[in-house]
Image (cartoon, grey):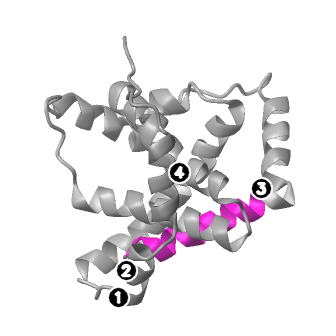
C-alpha cells in the first residue's frame, strides 16, 4: 500500500509524457545525438549492478519471494491498471500491458538473463525509457515508500478493498482460459 500512490504518481507522469508526444520527441532527439554520444550499456551503473549480485547468490531451485519487492511490483501493476482504466483503455490492452507481458515475458527473461540485459536488448524507446524513468522510480520509492514502511504506516483498507474487488481479476481469469498450456522458457 505504501508503494501504490508513489507508483501512481510516476505512472501519471509517464502517461502524460507519452500522450503529449514529449516521450517520442525525446527519443527522436536522443537518436540524433547517438552519432556523437552513443548509448552505453545500462549494467555499468550501481543501480543495475545490484541485480547481478542478487542473481549470483540465489538458489535456482526455489527463489524466495521478498514481500517488499513483491508489494512494490504489485503496486506498480495496479497503478498502471487503474490509470489505464481511468483513461478509457480497453481491458485487453490493460491486462496485456500491465500484467500479462510482465508475468509471461519479462519475468522469465529477467530471471534468466537479468533486468539490465533485458533492457539493453529492447527497442531504443524502451532502452531510453528505462534510463529516464528508473531513477525516478528509485527516487520516489526511496523518498516515500521506504520511509512509510519504516514508520509502519497503517494499511489503507479502502485501497486494499479496491484491489481485492478490481475487475481486472475477472479479466485475467478469462485470459487464463485462453492461454496455451505451455509456459514460456528462456534457454541458453
Classify mark 4: helix, strand or loop: helix
Q: Gap between marks 2 and 3, in whole Å?
A: 29 Å
- The dominant secondary structure in magenta is helix
The image quarter in which residue 162 lies? bottom left
Q: Classify residue 97 as left or right of residue 31.
A: left
Q: Gap between marks 3 and 1, in whole Å?
A: 32 Å
Q: Earlier in the sequence, mark 2 or mark 3?
A: 3
Q: Position of residue 122 (x, y in %)?
A: 61, 29
Which span is picked out in magenta?
2-18
Residue appearing at x 57%, y 62% in the figure: 80
Q: Earlier in the sequence, mark 3 or mark 1?
A: 3
- Image quarter in which the C terminus is found: top left
The image quarter in which residue 107 lies? top left
Q: Position of residue 81 (x, y in %)?
A: 56, 64
Between marks 3 and 1 in the image, the one whose residue lies nearer the viewer: 1
Q: Gap between marks 4 and 2, in whole Å?
A: 26 Å
Q: Position of residue 82 (x, y in %)?
A: 58, 70
**Front position in the image: 32 or 61:** 61
Read off the residue under disc 3: 18
Classify mark 3: helix, strand or loop: helix
Read off the residue under disc 1: 157
Q: Earlier in the sequence, mark 3 or mark 4?
A: 3
Q: Position of residue 126 (x, y in %)?
A: 64, 38
Residue appearing at x 48%, y 73% in the figure: 166
Check residue 134 in the rendering and tell me which mark sits there, or answer none. Answer: 4
Read off the residue under disc 2: 160
**Front position in the image: 153 or 160:** 160
Classify mark 2: helix, strand or loop: helix
Whether the residues at callouts 2 and 1 have beta carbons within 8 Å, the answer is: yes
Between marks 3 and 4 in the image, the one whose residue lies nearer the viewer: 3
Q: Residue furthest top?
A: 188
Amino acid at each position: 500500500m505504501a508503494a501504490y500512490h508513489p507508483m501512481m504518481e510516476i505512472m501519471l507522469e509517464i502517461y502524460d509524457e507519452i500522450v503529449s508526444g514529449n516521450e517520442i520527441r525525446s527519443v527522436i532527439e536522443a537518436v540524433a545525438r547517438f552519432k556523437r554520444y552513443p548509448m552505453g550499456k545500462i549494467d555499468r551503473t550501481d543501480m543495475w549492478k545490484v541485480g547481478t549480485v542478487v542473481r549470483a547468490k540465489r538458489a535456482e531451485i526455489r527463489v524466495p519471494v521478498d514481500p517488499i519487492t513483491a508489494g512494490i511490483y504489485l503496486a506498480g501493476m495496479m497503478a498502471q491498471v487503474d490509470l489505464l482504466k481511468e483513461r478509457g483503455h480497453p481491458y485487453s490492452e490493460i491486462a496485456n500491458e500491465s500484467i500479462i507481458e510482465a508475468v509471461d515475458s519479462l519475468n522469465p527473461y529477467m530471471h534468466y538473463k537479468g533486468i539490465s540485459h533485458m533492457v539493453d536488448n529492447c527497442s531504443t524507446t524502451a532502452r531510453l525509457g528505462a534510463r529516464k524513468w528508473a531513477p525516478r522510480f528509485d527516487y520516489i520509492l526511496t523518498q516515500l515508500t521506504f520511509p512509510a514502511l519504516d514508520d509502519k504506516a497503517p494499511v489503507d483498507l479502502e485501497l486494499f478493498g479496491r484491489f481485492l474487488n478490481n475487475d481486472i481479476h475477472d479479466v485475467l481469469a478469462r485470459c487464463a482460459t485462453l492461454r496455451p498450456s505451455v509456459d514460456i522458457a528462456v534457454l541458453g
